[in-house]
Image (cartoon, coloured by chain):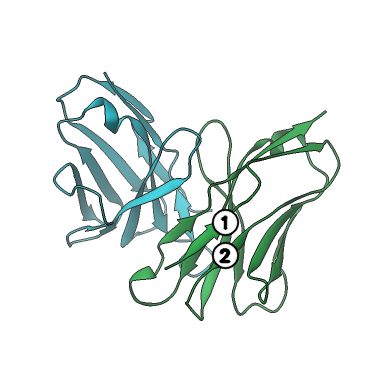
Chain colours: A green, B cyan
Amino acid sequence: AQKITQTQPGMFVQEKEAVTLDCTYDTSDQSYGLFWYKQPSSGEMIFLIYQGSYDEQNATEGRYSLNFQKARKSANLVISASQLGDSAMYFCAMRGYSGGSNYKLTFGKGTLLTVNP
Amino acid sequence: GAVVSQHPSWVICKSGTSVKIECRSLDFQATTMFWYRQFPKQSLMLMATSNEGSKATYEQGVEKDKFLINHASLTLSTLTVTSAHPEDSSFYICSARGGRYTGELFFGEGSRLTVL
């Protein structure tokens, strides 16, 4: 079974500052993928960044970077230079690659980020 | 990037009626689509995996007779909520495999169902 834990129900950050959203995971799969999605109030799920379990380097996509610490089973999202438009719900998700878990995403409970002007 | 479209984006229906939600992959073929349900301020819960040309695979606890899933083509999956009741009111989101990463999932815009 896979489990994603996001311990921060809500986070506040000042505009232009960096913020880290925590995510820890648990899985018995040797190969897996970790995702971060943004969900604004409109409800759509916006893909932000992906990290494969065998990727040696941390993933980066523009202002988003994923701090992947495999031994600690953590995959924290770092947003640099926060913008007002970054205010949204953020979900960490995992996908296993074995048997029936292929391509199914398991989501954490989410972190509501509020960017203050 | 790959685009997944859901329709309708919101629907209000009377208790006892059935509602169909469509999920389309607009610029790629999706052999597998997933249907999620999200209650307010909660996470997404996978309901079922929809495979083109075969029966859907439902997650434990999801009533397959209540939530009918059809994946008749490589670009369309439908979710029908049969005999809807107020407790079925929720946000339903579909996703489809495609994109730059192997098996990357793209999500539709979601459909908000309100059953009166």
Q: Residue at x 83, y 36 (%)?
A: A15
Classify B21 as above or below A19.
above
Protein chain holding label 2: A
Q: Residue at x 21, y 49 (%)?
A: B69
Amino acid, disc 1: Thr
Q: Residue at x 67, y 72 (%)?
A: A72
Dot 1 and dot 2 residues touching (CB under 8 Å): yes
B99 displayed left or right of A115: left
Numbered label attached to residue A113: none
**Quarter-wise, where is residue B97 in the image?**
bottom left
Q: Position of residue B94 (x, y in %)?
A: 37, 47
B39 displayed left or right of A45: left
* Alpha carbon separation for disc pair 1 and 2: 6 Å
**Quarter-wise, where is residue A77 in the image?**
bottom right
Protein chain holding label 1: A
Earlier residue among tags 1 and 2: 1
Crowd rating for badge 1 (residues with CA inside 10 Å; few <14, some 14–19, many 20+): some
- Residue under label 1: A5
Question: Depth check: B81 or B33 in front?
Answer: B81
* Quarter containing the N terminus of chain A: bottom left
Element assignment for label 1: strand
To the question of a shared chain for discs 1 and 2, the answer is yes
Element assignment for label 2: strand
Amino acid, disc 2: Tyr
* Quarter containing the C terminus of chain A: top right
Numbered label attached to residue A25: 2
Q: Residue at x 79, y 42 (%)?
A: A82
Question: Depth check: B71 or A20 in front?
Answer: A20
